[in-house]
Amino acid sequence: MATALSDIKRRIGTTAQIRKVTSTLQKVAGAKLVQEQRRIANADEYTGRLLDLLHLAERGLPSGALSHPLMQPRAGGNAIALLVFGADRGLCGTFNAVLMTAVSTFVEQHRDATVHLLMSGKVPYKRAVRQQFAPLEWVEQIDGLADRMMAAFGSGMYRDVHLLYWDFITRGRQAITVRQLLPVTALDHTSSAAAPAALVSPPIEPSPQALIDSLLPEYVRRAIHDAFHKSAASEHAQRQLAMSRAADNAGEMLAGLRKRYSRLRQENITTEMLEIVAGMYR
């Protein structure tokens, strides 16, 4: 009986510690999520203004003009770059598992091409190594990645470049997104001020083409940074939810263990009292 009580007491201590850890991870994920939401809001505003200017410049070009090399398809070539944004740590539900399923689906859908995987995030990279994806590369820093991809696309190394990431919609809703980055096929955006068709085109100096040449590379850079931060926000949201459920489960288990401990302890006390009473009448 004493052994059983000691075992339950040990399990109570372990479960309480687990609940404490998961609760802490939940709070940390929540705080990081708030920071990422602020970054996303600021980035969306910046990207919106950037696209407004690009739309104005596009409207000033002659009809049918190819506005920039980054918007021109590359003839020939059989290589595709897929930039994947994952997590460096686990404990975030099915975040990394679903991401890797999407990677496998993308590779399967492009069996006619060589898919070069560039993985941001240690967990999906290690899973890709185990699944023997090749060619495969781990991206430790995203700074400079956009310039590298634009140079590789311009040289004909890749016929196109895609992004694969978790798009953050709300705290309770995220979705896997596959987006073509290069060549830039469309600048889909509705201005916060007015739709592009409703805007009056002002004079652009020195020229619309010069404005596009200056802003389109920045648009590509922003697309990569936006994907990175939206994936990070989705990771924190899913970790917050997973740790909340884990803390709740640990709390329920802890309550059950405490009830069991109290019941067993009471039974132990009752048994000892009965033994004492029985000894008095021998």
Image (cartoon, rainbow, N blue to C red):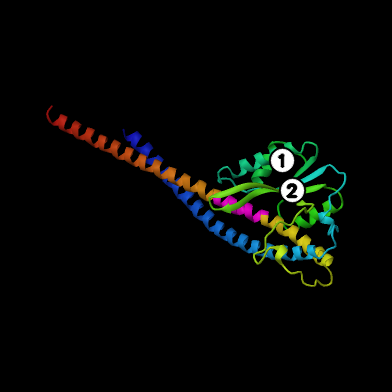
Q: Residue 131: x, y in percent?
A: 69, 36
Which quadrant would residue 217 be assigned to in this image?
Answer: bottom right
Residue 181 in the figure: left or right of residue 265: right
Q: Earlier in the sequence, mark 2 or mark 1?
A: 1
Circle 1 packing at 10 Å, graded few (<14), some (14-19), many (20+), is some
Q: What is the tally of numbered marks visible in this picture?
A: 2
Q: Which residue is mark 2?
A: 162
Three-letter code for the amino acid on which mark 1 is drawn:
Phe
Three-letter code for the amino acid on which mark 2 is drawn:
His
Secondary element under disc 1, as helix, strand or loop, is helix
Per the image, is 230 magenta? yes
* Residue 73 in sight from this viewpoint: yes
Secondary element under disc 2, as helix, strand or loop, is strand
Vertical side of 182 occupied by 114: above or below: above
Residue 206 numbered mark, or none: none
Q: Quadrant of the C terminus?
A: top left
Q: Residue 187: x, y in percent?
A: 74, 57
Q: Residue 58: x, y in percent?
A: 79, 62
Which residue is located at x 49 percent, y 55 percent? 27
Determine whether label 2 and label 1 are within 8 Å by CB: yes
Seen from this angle, which residue lies furthest top?
282
Q: Nearer the viewer, residue 20 or 221?
A: 221
Q: Which residue is mark 1?
A: 106
Residue 235 in the figure: left or right of residue 282: right
Q: CA distance from mark 2 to mark 1?
A: 10 Å
